[in-house]
Amino acid sequence: MIFYWGQKQELTPTWFSLFDEYGKPTQMVNTMQQIWTGKAATTQAPPIKYMLVNGNGGYDNTLLKPNTLAGAKLYLDKPDAETSALTYKWQLIVEDWYNPNGVFSEKKPKEIANAIVTDNGADISFKIPDREGPYRLLVYVYNRQGYVATCNTPFYVVNNP
């Protein structure tokens, strides 16, 4: 069941969207096409497996010190010639998960400008913000056929992790 056909901001800008904010389709569009028509799409989104931040995944309680450098690596299902022509867009955002009244913002989260220090496609280093609190690293991966895949990992900045 599709409850929203488009791009939707919820806790992150990537979780519930069938398209990115520029209208690029995700793999979910292909999946729905196959379910509805019985025919598989000939073009697929980039094959993301997972992302690590300083060696930790999304389920880890990643605590990082302010004003330090961290590394992130995106792992793909098929790291071969097919994925060598991918374009990566990395973003570091301020997390918006604590709201005492239980209402979450549907506004686009604030991006930390100039956070990415080195960018080698699927492998980056980035500066940890100086302010304590929750953050999220996102990556958008585009292929030549116009598809996008996304991945994100949360972490918490604390003075004495």
Image: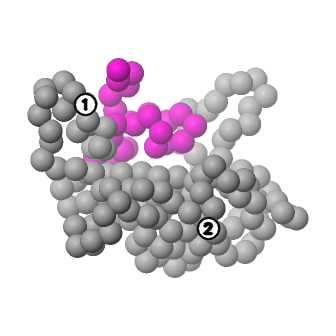
Give the camera-side residue of 137 and 76: 76
Q: Earlier in the sequence, mark 1 or mark 2?
A: 1
Q: Position of residue 50 (x, y in %)?
A: 47, 57
Residue under pointer 2: 55
Whether 71 is among the magenta residues is no
Q: Residue at x 75, y 64 (%)?
A: 64
- Asked if residue 110 lies left or right of residue 147, the reply is right
* Residue 93 seen anywhere in this rendered image of the structure: no
User: Which residues are drawn in magenta?
Assistant: 1-24
Disc 1 and disc 2 in contact, CB within 8 angstroms = no
Dot 1 falls on a residue whose secondary structure is helix
> Could you say which quadrant of the image residue 36 lies in?
top left
Local crowd size for mark 1, using a 10 Å CA cut-off: few (<14), some (14–19), many (≥20)? some
- Asked if residue 36 lies left or right of residue 101, the reply is left
Residue under pointer 1: 32
> Could you say which quadrant of the image residue 80 lies in?
bottom left
